[in-house]
């Protein structure tokens, strides 16, 4: 550990325990030099870093003062939660599981839905900061491009002392813990399952501006190419009402002439668009076209199609996210970035035909 980091950690510890409260004056440069037996440049670097993180404020000619919230006095006992939607798909299960873990510890969730919109996500982040939440659990809007994300704002939030936990999707360039799925492996498993049942011409229907779904496509594509097959790619963009998935599914089915016998979809919601489009042309599933989804959210909602899919461990994600954010709040100085990758298990049903001769 560098010398200036020792000074920073000591000051942060005092802020976290309440020994230094907002408005309290920090020791002078000369005092810190004597206490740690370091040069003035080392002390200045430590103080500069504290100010950059929003934990202190220097008033010229007067001194440096604490700005940090203390754990004991200013906890709001609230956790901000940002998901694409709050009442649809996998999100109610994740939210409920997180609340089950947080509520006994005295914390309450404040919910916000981004609708997969960057501007709306940014506004929610700002609102949570104004509400002085103790931590944030979120699925970030991220397509793989840091420039097209709220990465800088989220990084600033982390540096200000508010822990952030990513779920499902992540922004690898910033220091936030994350709970994600083994999406590339699942994509490969889906492709392998189809080829083992005789399918050699396989289409991939996926959202190209959402990194999680891109990873599922990439896993399937990599496996198919490894055995000498070339998948047919049908990308679309957007979530919910902002998505062009329905139109792209219709275009895909209009082109259907038997050149592909199976489709792997990046979610069950995406699979529904293919199923509905197939209905318009009298294409039968799985007799004419086999299909695999992801998330296990279509089976009960569309009983006519017993969809082969992958079970999203949504409740486990919610519990782990809540536990992780509580740990980060309890130990603010450790600031340990963790990455938990969960496996989604395939659920075999009746939407894939075995066409081996």
Image (spheres, grey):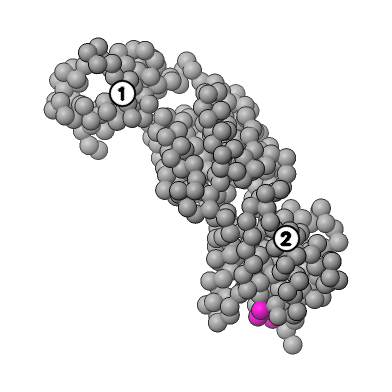
Label number found at residue 11: 1
Q: Is residue 290 above or below residue 316?
A: below
Q: Quadrant of residue 258?
A: bottom right
For residue 184, side relative to residue 2 (left or right): right
Q: Which range of residues does the magenta coloring cover?
A: 197-201
Residue sticking out furthest to the bottom: 357
Q: Is residue 199 above or below residue 326?
A: below
Secondary structure of residue under mark 2? helix
Are dots 2 and 1 in contact, CB under 8 Å?
Answer: no
Q: Residue 105's x, y, as percent?
A: 58, 26
**Residue of label 2:** 247
Q: Main secondary structure of the magenta part?
A: loop
Between 185 and 26, which is closer to the camera in this rendering? 26
Residue 44, position as x, y percentages in the image: 21, 27
* Quadrant that contains the N terminus: top left
Q: Residue at x 25, y 12 (%)?
A: 62
Where is residue 251, by image quadrant?
bottom right
Mark 2 to mark 1: distance in Å? 57 Å
Q: Residue at x 55, y 60 (%)?
A: 215
Q: Is residue 200 magenta?
A: yes
Would you say 19 lies left or right of 179 here? left
């Amino acid at each position: 550990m560098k010398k200036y980091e020792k000074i920073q950690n000591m000051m942060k510890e005092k802020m976290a325990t309440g020994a230094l409260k907002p408005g309290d004056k920090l020791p002078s440069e000369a005092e810190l030099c004597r206490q740690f037996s370091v040069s003035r440049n080392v002390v200045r670097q430590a103080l500069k870093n504290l100010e950059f993180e929003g934990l202190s404020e220097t008033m010229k000619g007067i001194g440096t003062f604490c700005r940090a919230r203390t754990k004991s006095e200013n906890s709001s006992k609230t956790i901000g939660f940002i998901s694409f939607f709050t009442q649809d798909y996998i999100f109610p299960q994740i939210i409920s599981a997180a609340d089950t873990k947080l509520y006994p510890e005295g914390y309450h969730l404040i919910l916000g839905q981004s609708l997969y919109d960057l501007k709306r996500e940014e506004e929610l982040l700002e609102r949570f900061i104004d509400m002085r939440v103790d931590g944030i659990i979120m699925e970030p809007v991220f397509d793989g491009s840091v420039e097209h994300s709220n990465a800088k704002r989220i990084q600033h939030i982390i540096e200000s002392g508010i822990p952030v936990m990513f779920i499902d999707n992540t922004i690898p360039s910033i220091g936030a813990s994350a709970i994600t799925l083994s999406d590339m492996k699942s994509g490969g498993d889906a492709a392998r399952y189809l080829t083992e049942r005789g399918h050699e011409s396989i289409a991939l229907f996926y959202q190209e501006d959402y990194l999680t779904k891109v990873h599922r496509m990439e896993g399937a594509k990599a496996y198919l190419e490894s055995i000498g097959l070339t998948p047919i790619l049908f990308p679309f963009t957007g979530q919910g009402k902002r998505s062009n998935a329905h139109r792209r599914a219709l275009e895909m089915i209009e082109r259907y002439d038997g050149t592909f016998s199976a489709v792997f979809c990046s979610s069950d919601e995406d699979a529904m668009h293919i199923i509905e489009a197939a209905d318009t042309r009298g294409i039968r599933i799985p007799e004419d076209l086999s299909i695999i989804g992801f998330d296990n959210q279509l089976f009960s909602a569309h009983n006519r199609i017993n969809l082969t899919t992958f079970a999203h461990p949504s409740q486990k994600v919610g519990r782990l996210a809540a536990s992780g954010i509580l740990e980060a709040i309890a130990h603010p100085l450790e600031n340990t970035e963790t990455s938990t990758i969960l496996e989604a298990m395939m659920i075999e049903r009746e939407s894939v035909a075995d066409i081996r001769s």
